[in-house]
Image: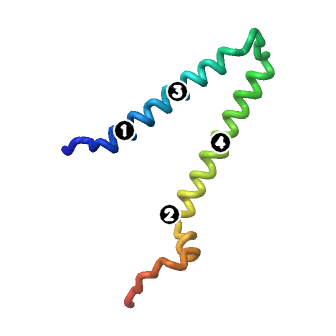
Amino acid sequence: MRGLSTGQIVLLVALGAVLILTGVWAVSVWSASSGVEMGKHGWIALGLGTFFSLLVGCGLMALMFFSSRSGHDDAADPFRHRERRDP
């Protein structure tokens, strides 16, 4: 197993710093509600919005994989050469 190069280490450190800063920012924004509580209807709306966003995203990904595996996308790619089958 080879070691990491200097560029890879710098990239990992930079991405880690961005991840940590994003987490700190998200926690500070979440806790800065200044005493305003979200009601029952707000939590229901948040839950339903999250559920349906995930449902649509998963559905579109499933359709993409189905389309790719069934061969529907092959005809739309003008740069792909079809393999000839000899009878």
- The quadrant of the picture occupied by the C terminus is bottom left
Q: How is the image coloured?
A: rainbow
Q: Position of residue 79 (x, y in %)?
A: 50, 78
Provide the residue designation for mark 4: 55
Which circle, 1 or 4, is nearer the viewer? Answer: 1
- Comparing 21 with 1, the one in front is 21
Q: Residues within 10 Å of mark 4 (few under 14, many from 20)?
A: few
| Quadrant in the picture for residue 28 | top right
Q: In the image shown, does 26 or 55 lie closer to the viewer?
A: 26
Q: Position of residue 49 (x, y in %)?
A: 72, 34
Separation of residues labelled 3 and 1 (CA atoms): 16 Å
Q: Is mark 3 in CB contact (under 8 Å) with mark 4? A: no
Closer mark to the observer between disc 3 and disc 4: 3
Which residue is at a point 74% across and 22% down the rendered structure image?
43
Label 3 vs 4, first from the N-terminus: 3
Please tell me which of labels 4 and 2 falls first in the chain. 4
Sequence-first disc among 3 and 1: 1
**Mark 4 to mark 2 CA distance (whole Å):** 21 Å
Compute the Cα span from label 2 to label 3.
Answer: 40 Å
Q: Which residue is mark 2?
A: 69
Residue 7: percent from the left, percent from the top? 33, 44
Which residue carries the number 3 mark?
Answer: 21
In the image, which disc is placed on residue 10? Answer: 1
